[in-house]
Image (cartoon, rainbow, N blue to C red):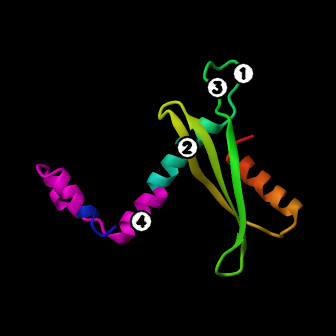
Amino acid sequence: MDHVSEVISRAFHESEIAKRFSCRRTKSAAIAYNVLGNNFEEKMLAKLRPRPENETERSLVFSLIIDESTDVSTTKVLAAAVKYYSEKLQSPQTKFLCMVDLKGDTAQDLFDSLTCALSEKTLF
């Protein structure tokens, strides 16, 4: 991420603004996580969300892929990804959906955590 300034300067070599642009690891990470990440996530969720029956565009059918694990701090987590077919790209797409901290490790705990995460993202 330390090369973003150089790439922008070369890509827009005629721009005075691009020549003065400065962006190192911390700022680049903040842009990627807080701006780009949110934007891409919202675009993906908009494709997956249920739509009213009177709309002409249908919502996509998607599959959930989940994996329960324990991270380095011994916190149990549930990773969820979605798989759907993109008409625009004419191919199946698999995208990361979310990572959920688990309060327990029973089937009911997994179900409740996943249901809560899907509800927060208004996917059902």
11 up-or-down from 33: above or below:
above
| Residue 66: image location, x then y, percent | 71, 57
Tag 1's secondary structure? loop
Dot 2 falls on a residue whose secondary structure is strand
Give the numbered dot on residue 53.
1
Which quadrant of the rendered structure holds the N terminus? Answer: bottom left
- Disc 4: which residue: 29
Residue type at tag 3: Arg
Tell me the residue that label 3 is attached to. 58
In this rendering, would 83 be left or right of 1? right
Q: Nearer the viewer, residue 33 or 79?
A: 79
Gap in angstroms between the C-alphas marked 1 and 4: 40 Å
Query: At 49% across and 54% down in the image, what residue appears?
Result: 37
The stretch of residues the image draws in magenta is 6-34
Q: Quick one: 32 or 86, which is closer to the camera?
A: 86
Residue at the spot of label 2:
93
Q: Residue at x 19, y 52 (%)?
A: 11
